[in-house]
Image: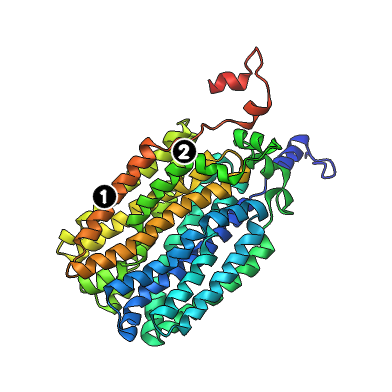
Amino acid sequence: MLQHDTKNPPKSASKDVQQRRTNMRWTIVGFSALGLTIAYLDRAALSVALPFMAEEFEIGPAIQGVLLSSFFWTYALFQIPSGWLLDKFGPRVIYPLAVGWWSIWTALTALSSGVVTTIIFRLGLGIGEAPVQPANVKVVSQWFPRRERAFASSLFDMGQQIGTALSIPLVTALAIFAGWRLAFIVIGIAGLLWIVGWLAVYRAPDKHPRVNQAELDYINSDQGEMVQAEKSTEKAPWRDLLRNNQVWALMTGYIFRSLAGAFFLTWYPSYLLNDRGFSKEDFGIVGAIPAVIAIGSTILGGIVSDRLLASGMSSNLARKIPIISGLVLSACIGFSPFIESNAWVMVVLTLSSAAHSFAGAAILSLPAEVASSPDTVGSVAGFQNFGSQLGNLISPIAIGLFLTFSNNSYVGPLVFAAISCLISAAVYGFWVRIKPVVPLAAVEEPPTTEPSPTERTTS
């Protein structure tokens, strides 16, 4: 019988052990997803609680629109400073500070005594949540190779849909059985618990004790241009981004996307309850369906984009195909007010929400694709998300005013949402330009006169 030498294992086996890489990056993006889930629980809680609050505070559609929009006033204003702070101090410091701040203001909303105090608490919440998306984009740019970034972005972005979906049954149940104020206290406590986990787990990849060299090499394997830029000692001021055509393209595309998407974050509960005649109990059961389906479509969009990139398609097309197709299909929301059946309305709204989310992961990967260096990814993401919040800010106020002057008709707002989706698709299709993927070896190693066997196979 053959005996194996346990003290001196075969070289091939030893080599396999040495090359087996860690996978800490998936744990990190999981915490990012959880952070965004809590953030969307916080911001969506008001739209679900608003029908209950409107009865208590006796407020009409116009004022409700102002309340729903107020969060986005400071959220939009602090996007660009948040991106700069993330580039300067990093996600390990800024992210938990932000979550702590917004959790406190969420819990304080339970003390609201009317419109003015509610707006004040929402303004505080907006300041705290401003860094959340730039932080997540920054985390993915640091922890993932380009070929995995769309899928990684889809994983953290599904926190948006999970948080929105959870807010509907959670806040509705608490509002019915214990009063709407308790919902804000419960969600605020959840954010404070997240901070403990983040501080225990998060470090930069090159400083993390649970990341080996194999994973570091894998993360940097197809970042070519970005890695090379990082070696440069000369850094462009973040203000120079204002002169970057692509920063304006990302901002504009997100403005129009959010003009449509904000409906699901703000007026969607009131639309089903007041216009479509859903009871509060029925809404608590079926209202979360679009957000639940959107979780899967968000992940699918990231997988499709990365698979297209892996197949050899240009990064420009691999990112744009899910973005444009998702936004065009999402325009079906414009048919909703012309459908009599509530069941079919839910089908159309679910399809629109899912298609809107399908585009999300590829969009969130774009700041890292167009940034000139890793030091500006957070700032580019801040500018992009600033555009998102302009749309979120304008939409609820505009809908509230339209309802006030149109005898509570949702035709105009939903048709406009459809048009906004199509405009956004055109911006991403014709204006945004994404850099090609350049392997690290192609940047660092000079070309040889004789192509290697690997290069010949690739060709």
Mark in the foreground, 1 or 2: 2
- The percent position of residue 10, horizontal first and vertical second, equals 78, 37
Residue 108 is tagged as none
Q: Quadrant of residue 341?
A: bottom left
- The percent position of residue 436, horizontal first and vertical second, equals 51, 31
Q: Is residue 439 left or right of residue 314?
A: right
Identify the residue under disc 1.
419
Q: Quadrant of the N terminus?
A: top right
Question: Disc 1 on helix, strand or loop?
Answer: helix
Mark 2: amino acid: Asn
Rendered view: 451 above or below 322: above
Mark found first going from the N terminus, 1 or 2? 2
Q: Is residue 400 left or right of residue 313?
A: left
Mark 1: amino acid: Ile
Identify the residue under disc 2.
245
- The percent position of residue 154, horizontal first and vertical second, equals 47, 51
Who's the residue at 34% across and 84% down the image?
57
Distance from label 1 to label 2 (Cα)? 24 Å
Q: Is residue 140 something that shows in the picture?
A: no
Question: Disc 2 on helix, strand or loop?
Answer: helix
Q: Quadrant of residue 225?
A: top right
Q: Is residue 18 something that shows in the picture?
A: yes
Residue furthest to the top: 449
Who's the residue at 39% across and 46% down the image?
253
Q: Is residue 396 left or right of residue 230?
A: left
Q: Are marks 1 and 2 in contact (CB under 8 Å)?
A: no
Rendered view: 336 above or below 320: below
Q: Mark 2 Cα within 10 Å, few/some/many (few <14, many 20+)?
A: few
Rendered view: 378 above or below 289: above
Q: Mark 1 Cα within 10 Å, few/some/many (few <14, many 20+)?
A: many
- The percent position of residue 9, horizontal first and vertical second, equals 80, 40
Who's the residue at 23% across and 65% down the image?
402
